[in-house]
Image (cartoon, helix red, strand yellow):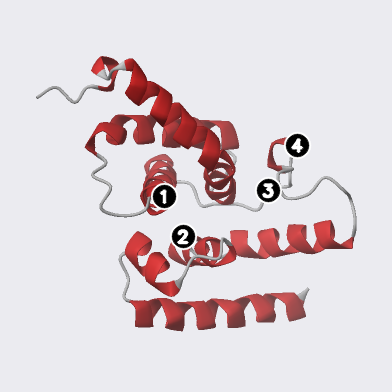
């Protein structure tokens, strides 16, 4: 059985492209949170798409497609960062990340501040808070991260406390 993506038929390719188009913003959000000086948004996005493409023939639809995409995107970004041996740094929002909002207003500034603080969290905490902000249930977050539902709830509570503390210190 040949699972080489180059041998995938055209309908599967079209299906894959449709899935990527539907979840493009989600993939960008995950990549954005792991952007560093040496791991640019474009590099991470390309790496995630490549890994999704390689894994697509093996996707068994045992979970939601969004869960599968999050899992691969998070694992790819974390692996990329580990491989580069870089510590994530705080980066300014760029045009590529303007998916949050077009208008420059109070909400935009609050979102920038939130993302700056999230960028200071550890890799697992960053993943959990991202999924939480995407309105994933505790069960979905547990499935994506491999944690228990109880552990997710505990970690989220601690993350919220950390973020509140960061806010007060600014």
Neighbourhood count class around disc 1 (C-alpha, 10 Å): few under 14, some 14–19, many 20 upward: some
CA–CA distance in space, label 3 to label 1: 17 Å
- Element on which disc 3 rests: loop
Whether label 3 touches label 1, CB < 8 Å? no
Neighbourhood count class around disc 2 (C-alpha, 10 Å): few under 14, some 14–19, many 20 upward: some
- Element on which disc 1 rests: helix
- Element on which disc 4 rests: helix
Q: Quadrant of residue 147?
A: bottom left
Whether label 1 touches label 4, CB < 8 Å? no
Q: Quadrant of residue 162?
A: bottom right
- The residue indicated by pointer 1 is 78
Percent of width and height locating residue 37? 59, 40
- Write the residue at 34% across / 16% down: 10
- Element on which disc 2 rests: helix
Q: Is residue 95 above or below residue 143?
A: above
Percent of width and height locating residue 31? 54, 44
Mark 1 vs 4, N-terminal side? 1
- The residue indicated by pointer 4 is 95
- The residue indicated by pointer 2 is 123
Where is the N terminus found, in terms of image quarters? Answer: top left
Mark whose residue sits in front, 1 or 4? 4
- Write the residue at 59% across / 64% down: 133
Mark 3 vs 2, N-terminal side? 3
Percent of width and height locating residue 93? 73, 46
């Amino acid at each position: 059985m040949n699972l080489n993506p180059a041998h995938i038929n055209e309908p599967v390719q079209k299906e894959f492209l449709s899935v990527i188009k539907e979840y493009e913003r989600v993939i960008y959000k995950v990549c954005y949170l792991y952007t560093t000086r040496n791991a640019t948004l474009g590099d991470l996005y390309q790496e995630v798409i490549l890994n999704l493409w390689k894994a697509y023939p093996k996707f068994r639809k045992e979970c939601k497609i969004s869960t599968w995409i999050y899992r691969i995107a998070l694992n790819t970004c974390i692996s990329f960062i580990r491989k580069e041996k870089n510590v994530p740094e705080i980066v300014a929002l760029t045009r590529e990340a303007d998916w949050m909002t077009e208008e420059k207003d109070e909400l935009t500034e609050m979102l920038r501040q939130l993302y700056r603080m999230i960028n200071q969290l550890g890799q697992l905490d960053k993943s959990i808070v991202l999924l939480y902000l995407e309105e994933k249930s505790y069960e979905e977050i547990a499935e994506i991260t491999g944690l228990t539902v109880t552990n997710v709830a505990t970690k989220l509570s601690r993350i919220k406390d950390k973020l509140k503390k960061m806010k007060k210190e600014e």
